[in-house]
Amino acid sequence: MYIFINTIYSIAALIWGDWRNWKQYYPTILFFIIGDFLYNFLLYKKPMWTFHDLILPNHTMITLLAMTISYTATVLIYLVRFPKGWLKRFFWFLLWWGIYIVIEYINNKMGFITYHHNWNFGWSGIFTGIIFFILPIHQKRPLLAWFLSIIIIVSLLIIFDVKISDMK
C-alpha cells in the first residue's frame, strides 16, 4: 500500500512540483522530515501509531519512504502553489488536509496503520491540520514555526502522559 501511495506522490510531484526552485523549499522539507524523526526517536518505546504493510518489512522502512518521497512531494506542491487570499488558502489547506486524512482513514480501515496509547483517528486529524498550518509558517518565518512546534510537542507529550523514561 505505501509503495503505491508514494508512487502517486512521486507522479504528482513530477507534474505539479516546482523542481527548478527546490532549494527554496529544502529547509521546509527538512523541517517536515525532522518532525517525523523526532516522533520516531522520542516515542520509540511508546509509539502513538505504527505503520504496517504487505511488502515493506516494518514501520521504520515505511516512515523513511514517506519522509523521502511523500513529504518532499507535499512541500513542493503545497507550498509552491499556496494561494494568495485567506479564503483560497483555507480551501487549499482543506484539500491537503483531506488528502492526508482520507489516505490515513483507508490505511486504518485496511490495518496498515494502528493507533496506540490513546491516540486515535481524531487526534490524527488535529495533528494533520497542525502540520498543514505550520508548513507555510516555516517557509516564511522558520523560527516562529520552530517555537510553535516546540510548544505543540511539549503539549502532546503532556496530553499523552509521555514521561522521560518512556523515551529511548
Image (tube, rainbow, N blue to C red):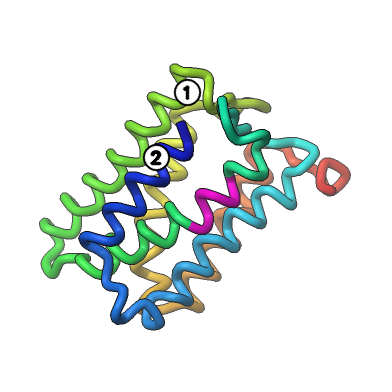
Q: Which numbered circle lies on residue 68?
A: none
Above-or-below relation of 38 to 43? below
Q: Residues within 10 Å of mark 2 (few under 14, many from 20)?
A: few
Above-or-below relation of 121 to 165? above
Residue 72 % position (x, y): 42, 62
Residue under the image location 61 percent in, 45 percent down: 156
**Helix, strand or loop at disc 1?**
helix
Q: Nearer the viewer, residue 114 or 9?
A: 9
Classified by dominant secondary structure, the portion drawn in magenta counts as helix
Circle 1 sits on which residue?
Answer: 108
Above-or-below relation of 29 to 12? below
Q: Nearer the viewer, residue 131 or 74?
A: 74
Q: Residue furthest right?
A: 165
Residue under the image location 80 percent in, 38 percent down: 45
Residue under the image location 54 percent in, 28 percent down: 113
Q: Residue furthest front?
A: 55
Q: Is residue 74 magenta?
A: no
- For marks 1 and 2, give the CA distance: 14 Å
Q: Which numbered circle lies on residue 5?
A: 2
Q: Is residue 67 magenta?
A: yes
Residue 23 % position (x, y): 40, 82
Residue under the image location 18 percent in, 59 percent down: 89
Check disc 1 and give the amino acid type: Asn
Quarter occupied by residue 83: bottom left
Residue 13 % position (x, y): 30, 59
- Locate residue 40 relative to residue 31 in the image: left or right: right
Task: Specify start and end residues of the magenta stretch as a single range.
Answer: 63-68
Q: Nearer the viewer, residue 13 or 129?
A: 13
**Helix, strand or loop at disc 2?**
helix
Above-or-below relation of 15 to 155? below
Check disc 2 and give the amino acid type: Ile
The mark that comes first in sequence, 1 or 2, is: 2
